[in-house]
Image (cartoon, grey):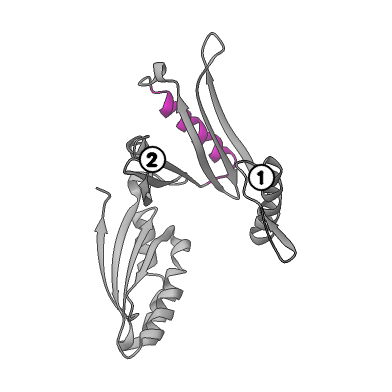
Amino acid sequence: MVTTGDVSIEVLDNDEKLTERLDAELTAYNRRATGADDEAGLSVRVTGSDGELVAGLTGWTWGGCAGIDMVWVREDRRGEGLGARLLAAAEQEARRRGCTQLSVASFSFQAPDFYRRHGYLDTGRREGIPGGHVDHQFWKSLATEPADAVRLVALVELAGTAVEAGQRYEDHVLALLNRHGGRVERRLRTGDGRTEVHLIRFDTRAGYTAFLADPQRLALRAELGDAAPQTRVLEVDEV
């Protein structure tokens, strides 16, 4: 324990009371910030004829979103499709609760390809997991078909005489994505601020088309005239 001024700092292996207190405090804060107060656990249990646990899934739902924390299938029952049945049951229940999206993480030695086969899209990765492995992040729309999704990379060049105006334009335009089923997965910018790279996903091609024709987007671009950013868009897939 270290005491500094009127506070003491103590590091412990486990503190259940602290976990409970932080959970309560952050839940209250999240409710105030979002207005969503319907958080609930989500569990799927599979048992054999002998009553023993064969497989299970745990997760959560909250404010139209769902997440999976853990998925496990007993070693002697793997390869029977139980993982797919767990996933389908969780997705069905999440939809019943009004959720439109579901997220999950998987280490590279676990089941990233399993999630990809079931329509989950890669949204990020973290290197440096023990053993040289990777932590993969996935997302799936529960409102549209995964095969309909469109992923884009936009290379945006801002006019040298209007960098700040161009950045503000991109701020406003990217904020319009959500109304068309689109979202920014990554937004990167060079040190001089003149070039940006956006990784964007739309739930459907129709949403992408509607975004391009959005009157507010077109009006914002018209306001900038010749100072509007020049954008090259590439349609890409995960490899």
Q: Residue at x 33, y 83 (%)?
A: 228
- Dividing the picture into quadrants, the one containing residue 215 is bottom left
Pick whichever, 47 or 203, lies toward us: 47
Pick whichever, 21 or 181, lies toward us: 21
- Per the image, the residue denoted by label 1 is 19
Q: Residue at x 25, y 56 (%)?
A: 236
Q: Say left or right for 63 vs 71.
A: right
- Dividing the picture into quadrants, the one containing residue 52 is top right
- Of all residues shown, which one is farthest toward the top? 50
Helix, strand or loop for disc 1:
helix
Q: How many marks?
A: 2
Q: Say left or right for 34 vs 163.
A: right
Tell me residue 80's x, y (percent). 38, 19
Q: Is residue 168 above or below residue 46?
A: below
76 magenta-colored: no
Of labels 2 and 1, earlier in sequence is 1
Q: Which mark is residue 97?
A: none
Helix, strand or loop for disc 2:
strand
Marks 2 and 1, how far apart at CA:
25 Å
Q: Is residue 215 above or below residue 94?
A: below
Neighbour tally class for label 1: few under 14, some 14-19, many 20 plus, Cα within 10 Å: few
Main SS category, magenta section: helix
Task: Please provide the residue range marked out in magenta.
Answer: 81-99
Tell me residue 90's x, y (percent). 51, 34
Q: Is residue 190 above or below residue 201?
A: below
**Kind of residue indicated by mark 1:** Thr
The reply to whether dot 2 and dot 1 touch (C-beta < 8 Å) is: no
Pick whichever, 31 or 179, lies toward us: 31
**Kind of residue indicated by mark 2:** Phe
- Per the image, the residue denoted by label 2 is 107
